[in-house]
Every structure is written in C-alpha cells, then in structure tokens.
Amino acid sequence: MAKIILNLFFMVISVLTFAPILCLSSKTNYNGYLYPQFYDWSCPNAKEIVKSVVAKAVAKDPRMAASLLRLQFHDCFVKGCDASLLLDSSGTIVSEKLSNANRNSARGFEVIDEIKSALEKECPQTFSCADIIALAARDSTVLAGGPSWEVPLGRRDSRDASLSDSNTNIPGPNNTFNTILTKFMLKGFDLVDLVALSGSHTIGNARCTSFKQRLYDQYSGFNLPDFTLDPFYAAQLSIMCPKLGGDQNLFFLDYVTPTKFDNNYFKNLLAFRGLLNSDEVLATQNLASLKLVKLYAESNEIFFKQFAKSMVKMGNISPLTGFKGEIRKNCRKINN
C-alpha cells in the first residue's frame, strides 16, 4: 500500500513538473515535430477563427478556395512549409511573389492577412503564418466539397525568401512528365502523391498564356495544336485564347464542375481535355500514371483518401521548428 501511494506521489510531481513545459511548447515547438493539438493551450480558438475567415472569403469569391489551396503548394515546394511565399520585397528580401509561377497569378494574400490580424488579437505572436497557410488550404478544400484531414501544426515562419528556388522548384504548366515527377521526388513525393495532388486542379483557373502553346505551336513552328488535346475542346479554348492577345484571360481547369472539388479532373484527362500540358501528361506519357488517373476517375472516395494523405505529407516538407525562424507579427514582413 505504501508503495502504491509513493508511486502516485511521484506521478503527481511529474505532472506538476512538466505541465509548464507542455504549455510552453504550444508557443515554441521544442519537440521538432508537428501535431494537430499544438495550439490547444496557447490559442484554443485559432482553428475556428481560420475557418470562419476562409468561409467568408470563399462565399464572397468561390475562386478563393483554389487560390488558398495553391498557396500551400507554392510555399512548401520552395524552401519548405515556412510561409516564405508571403513575404513582400524589402531590404535584402526579394519576394517569391515575383517568380514566374506566382507573378500575376498567386492570390489570397489579403485573406491570410485578415486571418493573421484576427489571430494576433486573440493570441499575440503565437500562431505562425505557415500554420495559417496549412489550415486555410484544408478548410478551402472542404468548403469546395473535398476531403478533410487533420492538419499537423507547430511550424514557424522563415526570415527570408528565395525567388530563384521559386522559379526552379515549382512545376510549370508546360513541363514534361519526367520533369514534373523529378521535382516532386526531390521534395520526397512519389508517383502516387504526384497524381493525387495534381487533382487539386479540379478547382481553380489558369490563364491563357499557361496553355496557349498547346493550341498553336506545340511542334516547333508547325502551328499545330497538341495531338493530346481534344480538337473540339481546343476550338472552344481558341475563341477566348487567340494566337495573338488574350494572355490574361481565365479558363476553368475543370470545365465540368469548376468550383466543386471532385474527380472530374481525372475524367477530363481521359477524354483528352486536360487544360494544361502538365495535367494531360499524367494520362499520356507514363503507363503507371495513367493507371492512377483511371483509378481516381473511377473512385472519388479513393482519390479523396489519397489526396488528404498526400496533403499531410506535403505539409511536412522541411518545416521550421524549435528556435528556427520566428512567429511573424505580420505575414508580409519579418519581425524587427
């Protein structure tokens, strides 16, 4: 009996001893890994705040769901999931917003600003901009009718950006299949991740300039359209995407259900109606990739399950934890 009481005494002492550390770890990730409950002590209303602002933004502009989801891709593929994409140019920083992949294209920064402002009022200098991006991407997907997933949290924010890496690391709309796969593999992804994550193009838009080459000059000066592009679809696209002009005109990535997160994207690929070259190559340049496209086209449930799994994996690309980076007060600039 005395031994049991003694053990209970030491258990209580242990809890009291480590409780402050557990509370403190909600602000600084000493453990070095991410977990969904990271802010449960330090900012318990944070997830609801993020969700509320995202819902308002998407209700006002349905395109915003795709834009916020895209921010996580374009952030994590550069230096890791560290919110470097959000930094404006200043001092020694040249913003990643100026890269070919982001210039006149990346959007949603004002929504991130609004979320950050609300969180700073709720729990000052506690919630990172990198974690805002991760939660906003999940909430946007759900609002568009897509899958949900638990978002591991505890990232910190970068104090610099890399325009060169943004130009190099992010897959481009006219990249070949092998180039795209290589860029994904360099970030720790496999073919399954590549095909599933490409399914994010079930929502959103692309500019005429992103696919014009497929309509008019796919074969080095012969002025012929891409043979993997359905001729009737190509004719429709050419109306608002002429050979001269119209570069900034917007087109749905999925013309069937453009604002609904579903597997029609993959069905479009099988019908040779993928808008971007980087989309259609998944069904035309690799048999293993084509097999996955067919699988996701047949089963929305399988696609959703893998997409959620791959998004969690993406959110774990080189996060800053511990004493690395900082918690920015303003997502557009470093502290001090």
Image (tube, rainbow, N blue to C red):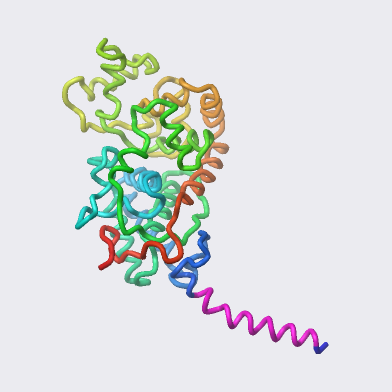
Q: Is residue 134 left or right of residue 152?
A: left
34 to 64, vertically: above or below: below
What secondary structure do most residues of the magenta stretch adopt?
helix
Q: Which residue appears farthest toward the bottom when viewing the image?
A: 2
Task: Give residue 180's position: percent from left, percent from top.
Answer: 42, 32
145 to 124, vertically: above or below: above
Q: Quadrant of the N terminus?
A: bottom right
Choose top left, top right, bottom left or bottom right for residue 100: top left
Q: Which residue appears farthest toward the top when viewing the image?
A: 222
Q: Residue at (49%, 33%) from the top-left corner?
A: 195
66 to 249, vertically: above or below: below
Choose top left, top right, bottom left or bottom right for residue 184: top left
Task: Give residue 333's position: percent from left, percent from top.
Answer: 26, 60
Q: How many marks?
A: 0
Q: Residue at (26%, 10%) from the top-left corner?
A: 222
Which range is magenta? Answer: 3-23
Q: Residue at (37%, 72%) from the top-left corner?
A: 123
Task: Give residue 203's position: percent from left, percent from top.
Answer: 38, 38
Q: Quadrant of the C terminus?
A: bottom left
State the residue in front, 326 or 22.
326
Task: Give residue 129's position: percent from left, percent from top.
Answer: 36, 59
State the residue in front, 104 or 87.
87
Q: Is residue 102 left or right of residue 17?
A: left
Choose top left, top right, bottom left or bottom right for residue 46: bottom left
Residue 137 belongs to the span the image colors magenta = no
Is residue 106 visible in the rendered structure shown here? Answer: yes
Q: Which residue appears farthest toward the right when viewing the image?
A: 1
State the residue in front, 185 or 244.
185
Is residue 51 visible in the rendered structure shown here? Answer: no
